[in-house]
Image: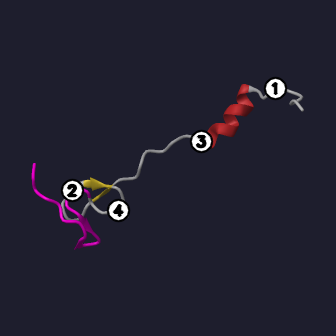
Amino acid sequence: MQPKRRTSKSKKNMRRSHDALTPPTLSECPQCHEVKMPHLVCPSCGYYKGKEVIEISEEK
């Protein structure tokens, strides 16, 4: 079965109004003050909630 009427551009765009992507939320690491994703281990220093979780080697 086919739709009786074509969906208008306006109706289509109104339906898609909630589909926009949002940029990821970033927070500052309290140890090294680098930008990181919240609720994740800091990739630059390896700390999470004040404890060292991952040992990061200083080879740069």
Q: Nearer the viewer, residue 51 or 12?
A: 51
Image-based side of 37 in relation to 7, left or right: left
Q: Name the residue at 23% across, 55% down.
A: 34
Q: Name the residue at 78% across, 29% down.
A: 7
Label 4 Cα crowd, 10 Å radius (few <14 / some 14-19 / many 20+): few
Residue 23 percent location from the top left of the image: 43, 45
Q: Are marks 4 and 3 in contact (CB under 8 Å)?
A: no
Instruction: Determine which quarter of the picture holds residue 14.
Output: top right
Identify the mark nearer the N-term, 4 or 3: 3
User: Residue 6's mark?
Assistant: 1
Image-based side of 2 in relation to 33, left or right: right
Q: Name the residue at 35% across, 56% down.
A: 37
Magenta stretch mostly in which secondary structure? loop
Where is mark 3, residue-wise? Answer: 19
Where is mark 4, residue-wise? Answer: 40
Q: Secondary structure at mark 1?
A: loop
Label 3 Cα crowd, 10 Å radius (few <14 / some 14-19 / many 20+): few
Residue range in magenta is 43-60
Identify the mark nearer the N-term, 1 or 2: 1
Identify the mark nearer the N-term, 3 or 2: 3
Label 1 Cα crowd, 10 Å radius (few <14 / some 14-19 / many 20+): few
Q: Are marks 4 and 2 in contact (CB under 8 Å)?
A: no
Q: Residue type at mark 3? A: Asp
Where is mark 2, residue-wise? Answer: 44
* 12 in relation to 48, above or below: above
Identify the mark nearer the N-term, 3 or 1: 1
Q: Residue type at mark 2? A: Ser
Real-space Cα separation, disc 4 to disc 1, in angstroms: 46 Å
